[in-house]
Image (tube, rainbow, N blue to C red):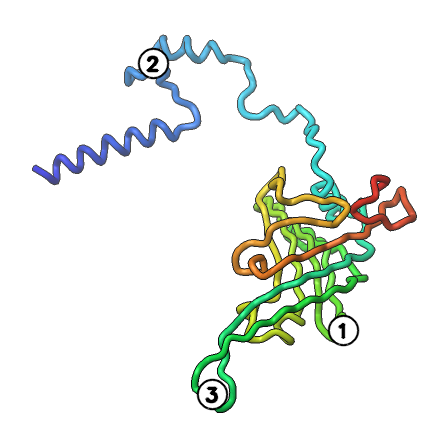
Amino acid sequence: MRTLIFTLLFLVMGGSYAQTSQPWQPDANGDGLINAGDMLAFLTVFNTQWGPDMTVACDYQGTELETLMADLLTGDATMDSLYFAYSIYDSAEVFMPDCPEPVMVYNLVERSGTIASFERVTFPDGRLTVTSGEEIDGHYVFFDVRYNPEFGVYSIEFGDAAIVAEAAPFFDGLWHYANDHIGLPLPSSWYLDELGIHFPAYEGTLNQYGDFQFVPFWSTPASDDSDDAGDSDE
């Protein structure tokens, strides 16, 4: 008996789910029959728009950061260089020679530089990337802006190998500051001003260890001069 009751309950729940998941419900009055009453309900929406109106042009203007990222990814702007600076701090317990107890030590890493070479790449699957990578004072540094059209994901990532090379065992071995977001608009915490590009890093990168600054310099076909984030002429 319990098996029969469970089976009937499952069928009722399954039927209810099937009804609510349909894109169009022909049984408008819910009486379990498709009849004239349902036809009248259909006639009330006859010859009206079904789904989004694709003839309406998108008039979304975008923020300064969204516009810059779009222009860089489509080639309407060129990243000429990017100034970076960061100050990160961490502590760790380490064992010293001839000492049986761990000792707490501290490490402050401050570094800055300018990435001078960027390249725009379009992959066969449609992904767009403005990528960089060069040695600065003997350590590999990069700053990338990416877009994956399949999932609508925008990404920004910075990495500096000096953090690992000069700061082990601190910072959990991390050397990236990065985040991504699906679709537009970007969160309000992602923005561009006279101090540069601002965005929070997600867990698993260096977001909890200190402050980062990224100041882009870019040019457009309409301008021969490289402008930074604070120039209103850009």
Question: Where does label 2 land, which residue?
Answer: 29
Secondary structure beneath label 3:
loop
Residue 180 location (% of width, % of height): 59, 50
Q: Marks 2 and 1: which is nearer the front?
A: 1
Relative to 186, is 26 on the left or the right?
Answer: left
Q: Which mark is residue 188?
A: none
Above or below: residue 166 compared with residue 219 = below
Give the image location of residue 177, x and y in percent.
62, 59
Which numbered disc, 2 or 3, marks the residue closer to the eye? 3
The residue labelled by disc 3 is 99
Indicate the secondary structure of the residue bearing disc 2.
loop
10 Å neighbourhood of mark 2: few (<14), some, or many (≥20)?
A: few
What residue is at 85 percent from the left and 45 percent from the top? Answer: 220
Q: In percent of the image, x 66 and y 52: which residue is there? A: 146
Mark positioned earlier in the residue sequence (3 or 1)? 3
Q: Quadrant of the C terminus?
A: top right
Look at label 1 and name its amino acid.
Asp
Structural crowding at the residue carrying mark 1, measured as other residues with C-alpha within 10 Å and reported as few (<14), some (14–19) or many (≥20): few
Disc count in the image?
Answer: 3
| Of marks 3 and 1, the one in the foreground | 3
Gap between marks 2 and 3 measured at Cα: 81 Å
Q: Earlier in the sequence, mark 2 or mark 1?
A: 2
Q: How dense is the environment of label 3, judged by Cα within 10 Å: few (below 14), some, or many (20 and up)?
A: few
Amino acid, disc 3: Cys
Residue labelled with disc 1: 137
In 3D space, how far apart are the residues under numbered discs 3 and 1 (Cα atoms)? 35 Å
